[in-house]
Amino acid sequence: MIVSWQRARYWLRNGGLCALLSMSVLSAASTAPDPPATSFIKTSGTNFTLDGEPFFVTGVNNHYLTYGSKDEVTRVLDDAVAMRANVVRTFLQPVIGSLDGRVATIWDWQLEGEASNLAVKGTYLLYWDPSQNSMAINDGANGMQKVDFLIAEAGKRHLRLIITVLDFWAFTGGAQQMRAWYGSRDEATFFFSDPRTKRDYRTWVRHVVQRVNPLTGLAYRDDPTIMAWELINEGNAKPEALRLAWTAEMSAYFKSLDSNHLVSSGNANIFDPKLADLTIPSIDFGTWHGYPVYYNLTIQQFNDMIPEFCQLGARAKKPVLLEEFGHARSNKNAAEAYAMWLDTLTRDRNCAGWMVWRLVSRQDSGRYPVDEHDQFDIHNDGGALWNILKAAAARATQTRDTSPAPESGQQLP
């Protein structure tokens, strides 16, 4: 409903109709369903924009949207709407070896269980074809048609998508499976430097960007439901110079194929030099991933990092998005931590938004996934954490529209 009001305000401001519309019309505008997205998300300085108005990201991550069942996918999207999120981020996966087993799959593709726990139930997007001695793409019902469904369903719900076209990690294959096709065990350099894997990556990008979704009639590159492309999730290439060179090359390639969508690296960017890829002209916005438990930080210390990263965006005149973050639910201060971080992100005008890791919904078993390790999962369960996220998403637009911009690093009351 917030987006509806923003659009109504935009129409009023630019159409000069204020004197002609009654409060009943305004009320109807604020509750009427949004039309399908027709405008692409852009950037202006440190802001994302939609139709020239600021678009502050209040979003969620989910890792199984490209291989879960249709019901599992729609439950996540419905819960994102219930949380008042406006963007959902996911990865294009899985990647396997060859179907005949001659080229090994380096992860447990046959795992039984729930989608949240990486049971992909026969889904694969990329694989090795021994008959052609090359990478192949699965456009079938257990392949790219699942991505078609995700995009179409997100569009129906007026959600935007950040689509990361590959994962660095081997949980469902990712870049590690692609370097394994060529017999390499080098996890940090081979994929980013070998001409064959670079060729495969470009082939994959071209296929994705140019694919026409039969459910919408739109090529992916022409679909405004997609907010942005990301090159690779946490692509930890070594040395850093190689990562930056690869990022520059592949982001420029994306731009050569698709002038409509934003492009970002998808890198965690947490270690020095922080947000180094912001200097690349074909990178439109910066990303960083924050998990205090992994960095031995208190919740206050992590809070103090937020304006530092957003200020880097201000210097580069590009948006910066905290696109992954989490704090274990078992911590007594979990609700306090999320409330503090979300408030800081919303109040600092140099920050472009946030995306929590990770929203998961009931599996086909009827249960929420078991999350015993990280305990970062967010559920639509009416609990304290859910209510904090929902309230923060609802409050973000109003706060950004009405509050003065604090100086970066200013302490909150």
Image: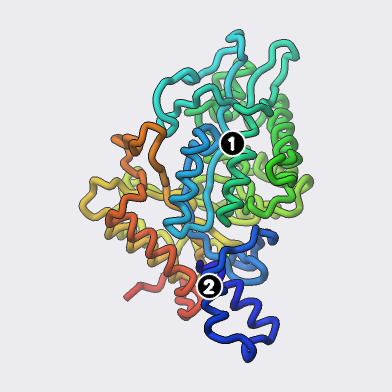
User: Can residue 208 be seen from the camera position used here?
Assistant: yes
Q: Which residue is mark 1?
A: 92
* Label 1 residue SS: loop
Circle 2 sits on which residue? Answer: 30
Between marks 2 and 1 in the image, the one whose residue lies nearer the viewer: 2
Q: Tell me where residue 163 sits by quadrant.
A: top right
Mark 2 residue crowding within 10 angstroms, few (<14) / some (14–19) / many (20+):
some
Distance between the Cα atoms at labels 2 and 1? 35 Å
Q: Residue furthest left?
A: 332
Instruction: State the image coordinates of residue 118 (x, y, percent, origin top left).
Output: 45, 29
The quadrant of the rendering that contains the C terminus is: bottom left
Residue type at mark 1: give it.
Answer: Leu
Q: Report the residue at 70% width, 28% height from top.
A: 200
User: Between disc 2 and disc 1, whose residue precedes?
Assistant: 2
Instruction: Locate residue 377, reporting x and y percent.
Output: 36, 44
The local secondary structure at tag 2 comes to helix
Question: Is residue 207 or residue 187 the one in the foreground?
Answer: 207
